[in-house]
Amino acid sequence: MTMQHRDLLIEIGTEELPPKALATLRDAFADAVTRGLFDAGLTPAGHEAYAAPRRLAVLVRGVSESTPERRVERRGPALQAAFDDNGCATPAAQGFARSCGVSVEELEQLRTDKGAWLTHTQTEPGQPAAALIPGLIERALAALPIPKRMRWGALSAEFVRPVHWVVCLFGDEVIDANILAVKTGRETRGHRFHAPAPIYIGRPDEYAALLKTQGHVMVDFDERRTAIRAQVEAAAHGLGGRAVIDEALLDEVSALVEWPVAVTGGFEARFLDVPAEALISTMQGNQKYFPVVDAEGRLMPHFITVANIVSRDESEVRAGNERVIRPRFADAEFFWREDRKQPLIARLESLKTVVFQQKLGTLYDKTERVEALAQRIAGDLGADPLLAARAAKLSKCDLQTSMVGEFPELQGVMGRYYARHDGEPEAVAVALDEQYLPRRAGDALPGNPIAQAVALADKLDTLIGIFAIGQGPTGAKDPFALRRAALGVLRIVIERALPLDLDALLHAAARGLQGKVNAADSVLPVFDFMTERLRAYYLDRGIRHDVFDAVVACRPTRPHDFDLRVNAVNAFLELPQAEALAAANKRIQNILRKHEGELPTEVDTTLLTEGPEYLLFDRIEAAALDVGPLFEAGDYTTALAHLAHLREPVDAFFDGVMVMADDPAVRANRLALLGRLGALFMRTADLSLLSA
């Protein structure tokens, strides 16, 4: 019999959902529903997920009307227990037959090499989808990633927001159920103001179009997001500028409106004397406005907001938004003026009252540690240690300004502005801002050596200190953002090609904590923690696990040098000799591990008796002379390419020479030759760990 299919529409109508979680809830709900349908055997053909401020919905295409029939085999008693000596059915056999609803004669027998049993096979009819779907919906809703659920009224139902209606339409029929204490139906609700009356849905595939044409609701999140972007860009163009569209803000605004209408607004040009970052921060963070900049990227005295209604008088909407933003800009203007009345350095003493971490002291204590470490790093980079010390000394002073107190996200940014106002060197001012880079994945890195020194010193001090007090990351918890700090250090050193030794810097950071905690024992755990972050870094770049492990085996302590090795091994894999040499290295290392302690330090040429071992020795010695300078220069890629030419003499050696010779001296000498060969490759990585 041909299985019939229908479309399924589920809509949960609520009060306004949390905007920052809306897209996540949409995807999680749709995934849970479709997964539940698949698990039940209802084989959906595809789905479309919808979300708007007052609803989560999913339209599932081609859902089977019932689960398929299935054959169920039951195994009964063993034949030996099913019949007596006269061949009559025992009570065990009779009871099994009754439980199957058949006579003993209708039972079948199963014989295997492990024994024989009575069995019965029956066909169970499929279950109607309409009977399964309500439970499936409830399980999907219960599994949503909602940190804190709420109740409403006197009901026992719990959800992220109170639920007011539920649509559950299977084809053109409503599946009767109670979901979250609401009886299901086929009527949805439109825009709260434009179309508050119920909207009848005849079939699931009419849903999105009906809401748009009759309900003034653009229910497709991605369509709404695209429309908002287009409207905002057009509005900015009309103002003679370009909209600054932060993607996270665009997502949030898309989750706040059902029917987007872009509205422009303006403010007094005098506010442009305030740093643009402060104005943009309050526009984006507090008001959800999109700033407008000119062709040179300078902030213009305009903004764009997105209303959730088509107003009869747009000027009133504009005036209302302008009225709201003005006091916030006035506050920023006041902070900007007042903060500059004293230099940043005057706030250093006040850091003694701000606790960084109880066991690690105040921000003043941390500043002193960062100052010492930054000087050392600057010296290693060939930069001016005094400039690094000055930048480190000022690095946390802007945290005590009124502007940063009101807008914490401007830490560093305001430090740069205030340092310039105070006449500090430009490298110092820039370092105050760039010390926090990278702030997120893929973010920019500090550009000048002074900024790099302060950024590294700050992050390394935090890493060592927090590990030393036993509060390193556990599972998903990382309250001090140590994973981000570790990756930040590694990215700066690698991507800026800095000649820094991580192990040495960690020991220096640990010494800076003397008198607070014993941090020396934390150097190795932090180094290993950062190495694992490095693994994730390379995996994201498409580097194979075994390539990373091959380099880790040599335990390089300079991240930039580590990167050069990884790239070299990755390039080596593309050579035609790679597979054979990787296998040879594996064989060499296996042999050497079995004979540790037996290896002479030098190869005795008088004990070389076979032609292939003479050839291999000569080629190894020649290669060593060629690649030695390359290794010293960090040119591992060229060095490995040279060593790849050893494949033929290596193959010839293993084909024609018995390593484990009867003569102990010859055997030891051949092991020394293999040790010499393995050591050459190990100057880059342990190629024996490569899978091919």
Image (cartoon, rainbow, N blue to C red):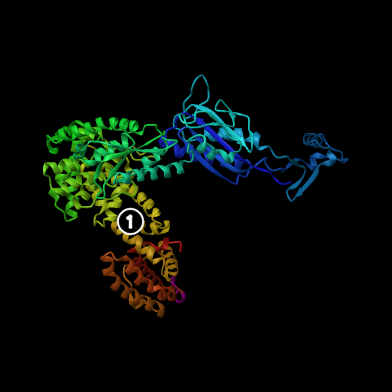
Residue 31, image x, y percentages: 53, 41
Inspect the image, locate mark 1, and give the three-letter code of the amino acid beneath it.
Answer: Arg
In the image, residue 217 lies in the stretch drawn in magenta = no
Q: In the picture, residue 495 is in which quadrant?
A: bottom left
Foreground residue among 673 and 450:
450
Residue 620, image x, y percentages: 34, 73
Foreground residue among 476 and 134:
134
Q: Report the span colored magenta.
A: 655-660
158 relative to 469 in the view: left or right: right
386 relative to 691 in the view: left or right: left
Foreground residue among 270 and 122:
270
What type of secondary structure mainly makes up the magenta span? Answer: loop
Q: In the picture, residue 611 is in which quadrant?
A: bottom left
**Residue 595 visible in the snapshot:** no
Which residue does the numbered mark 1 point to in the structure image? 555
Which residue is depicted at the point 32% across and 65% down?
Answer: 636
